[in-house]
Amino acid sequence: MSLKRQAETEDSLVFASEEGEDLSTDAACWTVLVVDDEPDVYAATCLALRGVEVLGRPLRFLHAESGEEAFALLSHAPDVAVILLDVVMESESAGLDLVARIRGELGMHKPRIILRTGQPGYAPEMQAIRDYDINDYRIKSELTRTRLYTVLTAALRSYQTLEAVETNRADLEYLLNAQNELLAANTMPAFALGVLERLAGLFGMPVNAVFCSDARRFHDVDENRRRVVAALGRYVDWSWRRLDSLGDGPEVEAIELAFATRRTVFANCGIAAFLPSRTGSEAVAFVAGQADSDVHDPRVFDMFVQNTTVAADGVRLVERLRDAAYVDGLTRLPNRSALAETIDTVLRALPEAPQRLLLIDIDQFSEINETFGDRIGDALLRGVAQRLETQAGSIVRVARVANDTFAAFGPRDALVPGEWAKSLDEPFDVEGLEIGLSVSFGGVEIRGDCVSGGEAIKMGYSALKRAKQTGHRSVAFYSHEVATEIKERTRLLHGLRSAFDQQRLFLMYQPQVDARTGRTLGLEALMRWRSDDGRLVPPDRFIPIAEQSGLIKDLGAWAMRTAIHRAASLRAAGQSLRMAVNVSMSQLLVPEFEVMVAEALAEGGLPAELLEIEITESVAMQSPDIVLPKLAALKALGVCVAIDDFGTGYSSLSSLEKLSPDRLKIDRSFVMGLDAEQNTGGIAEMIIDLGRTLGLSVIAEGVETATQRQKLVDLGCHELQGYLFSPPLALESLPDWLERHGEGFPL
Ligand code: C2E
Ligand code: CA
Ligand code: CA
């Protein structure tokens, strides 16, 4: 191989190169290929040009002894600038054949070619010189040292021009591609990374670079600061840091100078390219290292900056749109969609790590909002967001997923509900108001194999719903049971709603009798629902669902009207019986509940004394401020009030006096205790005593055995209700039953 031979010739002008080493890169000198089958010509050429510099660069010589050898060499050495080519070698046309292959087969258009021949007779046609882009044609004897130098200089100058044109063409092409790629980025950080990579590529520098711009992260509520939006290579640690926190190294100095002068700064440590913006958010891209500025036309760089600016404005616009889709405007926290994506990303990156999602819901926020107004409510939400952010630190992501529902997502150990609740314990100071609040949690344990972000949030909602069913300050974690329960409830609610619309609900009536004589004194109306498949759904199952959904208001009003209507017709038929109707808390809370009752009584033509309202002890005691006035209004109408399930709640004597009900209803569980020789019977006794003290009537429910009846009679209980006398009766069987048993059950 010729290269080896060059090394062997020990010619000082030859930059010896080991076989296999890359021939293509030595920008510091001009490579000249001498193609000649006479080694002496090569040696003479080298000698003649020894130590010579052309256009500021030394020469480097390569030698080939045949067209074949030259062709092989050129296909590995693309930076050959000038070829000194012998026309006649192995054949008379070997030289011109080689030229044709260089230009055609190898597609090398830059190398300048100087043909040399021993005799003038071998001169090629003008046509060939033009077609093959041959620079010069000389007879070897003409090429004296000076002559050779002149010819070579001219060839090299034209080579240099061609090279510059080609570089700029490549730069332009690169630039156009870069712009297209940059426009495809849809976030500022992605765009910034693209700019850095392309800028480094343009100058052929390794990618140690930073991109600074005005930017705010999710949790910066109102700050817009210069930050490192993207960083590469040795600067990666600078990512997202504020420019003013990076010290005063030469890079920072260059970047700051670029911002201050609004111009690109070529510093020793690198280039800080100033990127103006039409939308006001300018940037500086800094790339470390020395650019080979001779090679590149400065206009190309200007064009890069301009294109980048246009692209940046586009990206900012896209980002702002994205921002609107992913950031909650009120708190600047990520919103539900952003949270879902974050969870997805984390799950992809760390599928094995135990993660947790907590949904954090403010208890009774709507009441707070109604009381203080939206402005205070909003400020409160921002306050909550801030506290949650502080609690989150750097490893937990906080989001606002709905009006008063926040979320925290991160490693399980960092998401203990108790600790998060504590962070909100201190009252908030909002415009001088001190507002305290409590929260409930719905938690989900997340492992990569089972969920997506969207699903995880839904599961969180299920758990939260469960927690809210329990009351304030509660915590519930998602489980399959919770999911099934919630699904079942939803299914039931739909069924109940349509059953109500289609009038497939009905009432049954259970007699309430005088404890001693067994004579029927009243009836309790009990709601029934026969579902599509003919099964009776127990009210213990559907009433709570109706209560949570608010459907109870309609259901209750219907039951009230129907029961009153029934009592009125019984009375018309000569049976003056009291009608007891169960009323739940949410019914009682309907603003004009007492008006509805009064209207129903008037419509049915039933004396108010024949209507009894049963409210459970827990309802009666829960919010006395709401319940007391309601009951007072009902009592003013003449309606009776019974406290249902008595003994299971926590009535104090004083509150019971304030409620001043007409009747206490001993819960079935205490009646059951009367059968066995157990002490639970003692509670029934206490209630009966209490009734006597307060002058209230007492009724026992769930009486199933004669023993129970006997004991209750002995204790002085006034009335009884239960299977011993009758189960709840359908409307049709009621007249017949009353006919046979209405007058009494002998002891
Ligand atoms: P409650 O008010 O305590 O009603 C008494 C329940 O005990 C009724 O169950 C009744 O059928 C049952 N019962 C009566 N005697 C006996 C007995 O001797 N042994 C046994 N084991 N049970 C007996 P039901 O009808 O299933 O009603 C359950 C609950 O559903 C009621 O408890 C009440 O809280 C609620 N509810 C029923 N109808 C209505 C209504 O129209 N409105 C409201 N708000 N709640 C209702
Ligand atoms: Ca009842
Ligand atoms: Ca009861």
Image: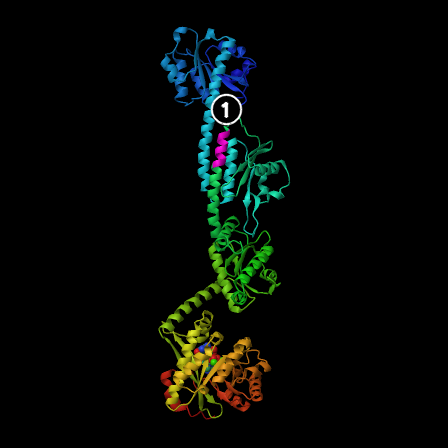
Residue 327 falls within the magenta-colored stretch: no
Amino acid tagged 1: Ser
Instruction: From the top left corner, tell me how far across and down residue 196 is, in percent.
Output: 52, 37
Q: Secondary structure at mark 1?
A: loop
Residue 39: image location, x then y, percent: 49, 11
Up-down: is 171 above or below 45? below
Horizontal relation, residue 257 to residue 154: left or right: right
Q: Is mark 1 within 8 Å of ligand 1?
A: no
Write the start and end of the magenta stretch as one range: 298-306
Question: Per the image, is 302 magenta?
Answer: yes
The residue positioned 43% from the left and 79% from the top of the image is: 596
As displayed, is residue 726 above or below residue 350? Answer: below
Residue named by callout 1: 24
Q: Nearer the viewer, residue 533 or 374?
A: 374
Our reading of the magenta stretch's main secondary structure is helix
Q: Position of residue 699 (x, y in %)?
A: 50, 86
514 sits to left or right of 680: left
Report whether residue 63 is seen. Answer: no
Color theme of the render: rainbow
Q: Nearer the viewer, residue 139 or 462?
A: 139
Q: Assess disc 1: are there few (<14), some (14-19) or many (≥20) residues with their C-alpha within 10 Å of its C-alpha.
A: few
